[in-house]
Amino acid sequence: MSTSRTRTRQMVLTALAAALAAVISPWSIAIGPISLTLGVFAAFFAGAILSPGWAFAAQLVYLAIGCLGLPVFSGFLSGPQVLLGVTGGYLLAFPIMAFILSWFCRLSPAWPVRLAGIAVSLVVCYAFGTAWFMYLSGNNLSTSLAWCVIPFIIPDFCKGIAALLLAKTLERRL
């Protein structure tokens, strides 16, 4: 595939990944101060199907359109106040998550490597998001972990696996 064709393909997939995030992320189930959302799936999907830089860009586009006022964040919220609020740290970690998973996926097609990519991505997201949450909410580490991390570990890891499977299926068809 030529370089310009590859670049065009990556740009189109980036736009589609950002659009997917915008469409599925607002649907959520509130679990305390943090919601169970498909935004994590969207970040993982971008990482699974795009190269690292484009995966990062897809998630930045998603954050930008939400910041500009489209209701694409959890609970159909929008605006910079969402990114600056107690859950903003998790959202701001999405581009990094996508980058990390993409890097692991490009490192090796082996499932153990890709599963490690999911785990590392989640650790980064949880560390950044929880530190942000603690700073803004004034809660201690154990309370923050109980509210913001522990209930989400298994569902988020499953979202990562589902994103890898969907990306693999789509890559075969594209």
Image: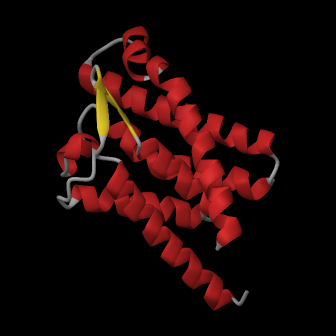
Q: Is residue 101 visible?
A: no
Residue 144 % position (x, y):
38, 16
Question: Is residue 124 placed above or below 67 in the rendered structure?
Answer: above
| Viewer-proximal residue among 112 and 56 | 112
Residue at (71%, 90%) from the top-left corner? 2
Residue at (37%, 10%) from the top-left corner? 143
Question: Is residue 116 placed above or below 13 in the rendered structure?
Answer: above
User: Which picture quadrant has residue 160?
Assistant: top right
Residue 172 % position (x, y):
71, 67
* Display colour scheme: secondary structure
Residue at (54%, 67%) from the top-left corner? 54
Residue at (27%, 62%) from the top-left corner? 65
| Viewer-proximal residue among 135 and 14 | 14
User: Which picture quadrant has residue 174?
Assistant: bottom right
Number of marks in the rendered image: 0
| Viewer-proximal residue among 94 and 45 | 45
Q: Is residue 19 visible?
A: yes
Left or right of 19 in this view: 11:
right
Question: Is residue 10 placed above or below 44 in the rendered structure?
Answer: below
Residue 116 % position (x, y):
71, 37
Q: Quadrant of the N terminus?
A: bottom right
